[in-house]
Image (spheres, coloured by chain):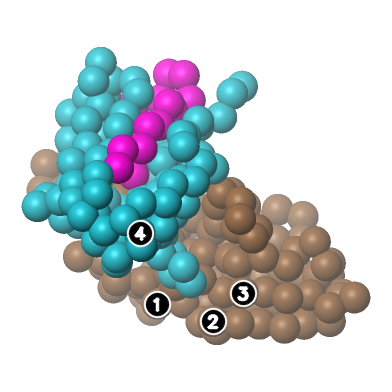
Chain colours: A cyan, B brown
Amino acid sequence: EAGVAQSPRYKIIEKRQSVAFWCNPISGHATLYWYQQILGQGPKLLIQFQNNGVVDDSQLPKDRFSAERLKGVDSTLKIQPAKLEDSAVYLCASSLAGGDNEQFFGPGTRLTVL
Amino acid sequence: GENVEQHPSTLSVQEGDSAVIKCTYSDSASNYFPWYKQELGKRPQLIIDIRSNVGEKKDQRIAVTLNKTAKHFSLHITETQPEDSAVYFCAASEGPDAGGTSYGKLTFGQGTILTVHP
């Protein structure tokens, strides 16, 4: 089966610019996650969708980050405006459902903010 | 919220030796504990997981043990090989909410860089 797809793979922007990332989960997976992975750290959950509804966004910096999952399939994560500390790899993952179902990760988008 | 501590941060072993990575968690309601392997520049991939109703699980050279009373769990790799070299992350899933629904929110440890020398 096809895995989780993400684009772009790399992005370099200047601070205060905007950027958007796209994720296409594995077909049939109801749950979609966006993680931020700063170099040398474990992934940190930013937002979790169940179908097209948000079930957890407690660690999403809502003053600058937004995410949506229209029609319960693809998702976009946006940063506006970007800060230097947003430099990280943004990982999208999906699972059949929440709970203890395996999460499958995409290849990630490496963001560099100059 | 959940807090996961992982040790050691780096681990160097000779090929054929065993490697052990330990994690502790804070939320006694956590009920699912996966381990992910991440090679340089690649995505994290699940290598083994354990649920709270099981004390130990083994898959070939990899095993995981869980002590719910002490709130810690460990990854054991035997007969290590150079291709085992990677960063390993433990994670704990948040327990169910007041309504009994478990959404599977994972909190990851800081990672262990494992190097296996030939």
Q: Please give the name of the residue rendered at 22% of the width and 37% of the height, measured from the top-left corner.
A: A67
- Residue A23 forms part of the magenta stretch: yes
Q: Is residue B14 left or right of residue B97?
A: right
The residue identified by callout 1 is B5
Circles 1 and 4: CB distance less than 8 Å? no
Front residue of B57/B93: it is: B93
Report, in whole angstroms, how far the alpha carbon at label 4 lies from the one at label 3. 26 Å
| Crowd class of label 3 (few under 14; some 14 to 19; many from 20; radius 10 Å) | many
Figure quadrant of residue A16: bottom left
Q: Which chain is home to disc 1? A: B
Question: Measured from the top left, where is residue A34 in percent x and y?
Answer: 34, 44
User: Residue at the right extreme?
Assistant: B118
Q: Nearer the viewer, mark 3 or mark 1?
A: 3
| Magenta region | A19-34
Q: Please give the name of the residue rendered at 26% of the width and 58% of the height, measured from the top-left corner.
A: A15
Question: Measured from the top left, where is residue A44 in percent x and y?
Answer: 34, 59
Does label 4 lie on the same chain as label 1?
Answer: no
The residue identified by callout 3 is B113
Question: Measured from the top left, where is residue B75 in percent x and y?
Answer: 60, 69
Front residue of B41/A79: it is: A79
Q: Nearer the viewer, mark 1 or mark 4?
A: 4
| Crowd class of label 1 (few under 14; some 14 to 19; many from 20; radius 10 Å) | some
Question: Measured from the top left, where is residue A87 in percent x and y?
Answer: 37, 61
Report the amino acid beneath label 4: Val
Circles 2 and 1: CB distance less than 8 Å? no
The residue identified by callout 2 is B9
Report the amino acid beneath label 3: Ile
Which tag, 3 or 1, sits closer to the chain's start? 1
